[in-house]
Image (spheres, rainbow, N blue to C red):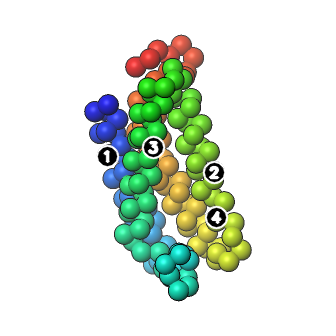
Amino acid sequence: MARILKATAGAAVLAALLNVLVYVAALGPIGADLLVDTPVSDGPETLPALNVVALSVGSAVAAGIALGVLNRLTGHARRAFVALALVVLAVSFVPLADPALATPDAWVLGVMHVAAAIPILALLTPLARGGGRGATAG
């Protein structure tokens, strides 16, 4: 469990760092507005950097928890974890199809979703038990 905790922390830091880099590039050279509408806003507003960090870290923590649960519940945690991660990633693109969202903003947000998924999958998947051909629980 300590290994999953360390990997989750590493994935959270890397996901947040990558997304902040994309965020800065998007608002600067790319010129995207990253306007989002939230239940507490009076209309679209620029996505705050703190939200980018919080959502990146939250995604990594949720993935770490999911991995811990899958390792306890199934002998095929690796397969289940990767499948779950890919489904969550695919579903995260659904709101980006909203016609009210500007195309550059949708593209940048999509890149941010992938940027978070890469370190999460890279650091957590090796800690998942079983699932591969000839793999043993570990």
* Mark number displayed over residue 9: 1
Alpha carbon distance from label 1 to label 4:
27 Å
Q: Earlier in the sequence, mark 1 or mark 4?
A: 1
Discs 2, 1 touching: Cβ within 8 Å:
no
Alpha carbon distance from label 2 to label 3:
15 Å
Discs 2, 3 touching: Cβ within 8 Å:
no
Q: Quadrant of the N terminus?
A: top left
What is the three-letter code of the residue carrying label 2? Ala
Q: Residue furthest right?
A: 99
User: What's the residue at 39%, 47% (across, down)?
Assistant: 61
Q: Please tell me whether residue 43 is drawn above or below residue 23 in the rendered image.
A: below
User: What's the residue at 51%, 20% (across, down)?
Assistant: 75
* Mark number displayed over residue 90: 2
Q: Nearer the viewer, residue 47 or 18?
A: 47
Q: Earlier in the sequence, mark 2 or mark 1?
A: 1
Q: Tell me which corner region of the image, top left, top right, bottom left or bottom right, holds residue 7.
A: top left
Residue linked to disc 3: 63
Residue linked to disc 4: 95
SS of the residue under disc 3: helix
